Image (cartoon, rainbow, N blue to C red):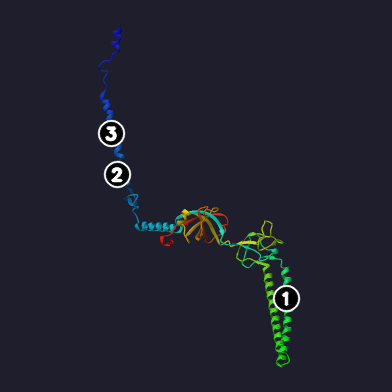
């Protein structure tokens, strides 16, 4: 019974073989598709051609066919603009940040101790060369000037008296009435009286100078940076120490059209900087604004602690956007080999 069931489940010899024709058809189809893909993917010289004006083929790396004069002019114009921009902008060999400063900051101080009687400017005011900005109390100087004037008048009277005596004695000496000794004495008295007159006149000149010093004038055209004193305040030309002593300066003024950028350059970058080198200055507050500049000063001594050397760049044609003590970026531009110092 079991043997009959096993015979029924057993496969025949023909059912064990697979159809070979269908398998070969699959292989042939895959091969054809692979060949077509390789054919269309292979690069050809004609693929790089484009059609230009008039249907003429050209390569993208070459100029399109057309008006040769127009193409040449476009090339010249493009080259000229590129070279002009390169010449104008220059290449930055080094970029360093620093601070905008006044080239000269002048602190106006009195020539002697005095009290401020009047001050006519405030911080930010524009001043001109020779403008009166401060008046010191001049009462003492005027009193001394009156005293010296009276002393001069007295000296002149004494000199006139000595002159009359000398003339009288000289006449008597010629008539053999007075001795030669008396004549010499009167002559010397006259010389001494004239010397006293000259001394009194010099004292008056000195006191007038002191009186003129009580009028403080601006030495430059500029702007008042700081107002250091007020009216009725005591000032002196020298400091006696401490923080509560008299002020030693009245005003601080500077020329706003004479600005520099003070920067510290690392010693490893010093080879990229030289005197009169062209620079481009950009204030950090207005990064889109650029100003021409040049290296005006290279410090003769470096800072050992920081390993830097101080450089000052003069700004050409500064305007209202440049404010002293604000930071600015300086680009040191490259120069042709013949322009560099040897």
**Between disc 1 and disc 3, whose residue precedes?**
3
* Closer to the camera in the image, 67 or 168: 168
Q: Which mark is residue 32?
A: 3
The image shows residue 141, relative to residue 335, as above or below, that is below
189 or 314: nearer the viewer: 189
Where residue 130 appears, as percent x and y from the top left, is: 63, 68
Query: On the rendered structure, is 89 left or right of 205?
Result: left
Q: Earlier in the sequence, mark 2 or mark 1?
A: 2
Q: Residue furthest bottom?
A: 175
Around disc 1, counting alpha carbons within 10 Å, would you say few (fewer than 14), some (14 to 19), or many (20 or more)?
Answer: some
In the rendered structure, are the residues bearing label 1 and label 3 in contact, judged by CB atoms less than 8 Å apart?
A: no
**Could you tell whether 277 is left or right of 72 in the image?**
right
Residue at point 74%, 73% (across, down)? 147
Q: Which residue is mark 1?
A: 149
Q: Residue at x 29, y 31 (%)?
A: 30
Q: Circles 2 and 3: CB distance less than 8 Å?
A: no
């Amino acid at each position: 019974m079991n043997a009959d069931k096993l015979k029924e489940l057993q496969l025949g010899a023909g059912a064990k073989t697979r159809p070979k024709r269908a398998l070969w058809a699959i292989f042939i189809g895959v091969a054809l598709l692979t060949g077509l893909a390789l054919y269309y993917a292979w690069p050809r010289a004609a693929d790089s051609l484009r059609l230009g004006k008039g249907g003429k083929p050209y390569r993208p790396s070459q100029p399109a066919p057309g008006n040769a004069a127009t193409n040449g002019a476009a090339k010249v114009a493009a080259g000229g603009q590129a070279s002009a921009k390169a010449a104008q902008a220059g290449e930055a060999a080094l970029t360093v940040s620093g601070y905008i400063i006044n080239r000269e900051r002048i602190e106006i101080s009195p020539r002697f101790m005095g009290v401020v009687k009047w001050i006519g400017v405030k911080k930010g005011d524009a001043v001109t060369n020779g403008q009166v900005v401060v008046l010191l109390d001049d009462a003492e100087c005027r009193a001394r000037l009156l005293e010296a004037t009276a002393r001069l008048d007295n000296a002149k009277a004494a000199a006139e008296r000595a002159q009359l005596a000398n003339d009288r004695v000289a006449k008597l000496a010629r008539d053999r009435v007075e001795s030669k000794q008396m004549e010499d004495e009167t002559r010397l008295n006259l010389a001494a009286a004239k010397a006293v007159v000259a001394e009194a006149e010099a004292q008056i000149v000195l006191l007038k100078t002191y009186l003129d010093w009580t009028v403080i004038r601006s030495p430059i055209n500029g702007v008042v940076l700081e107002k250091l004193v007020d009216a009725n305040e005591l000032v002196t030309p020298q400091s006696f120490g401490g923080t509560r002593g008299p002020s030693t300066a009245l005003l601080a003024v500077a020329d706003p059209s004479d600005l520099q950028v003070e920067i510290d350059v690392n010693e490893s970058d010093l080879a990229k900087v030289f005197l009169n080198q062209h620079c481009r200055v950009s204030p950090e507050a207005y990064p889109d604004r650029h100003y021409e500049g040049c290296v005006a000063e290279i410090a003769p001594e470096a800072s050992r602690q920081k390993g830097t050397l101080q450089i000052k760049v003069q700004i050409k044609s500064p305007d209202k956007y440049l404010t002293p003590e604000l930071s600015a970026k300086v680009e040191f531009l490259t120069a042709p080999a013949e322009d560099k110092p040897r």
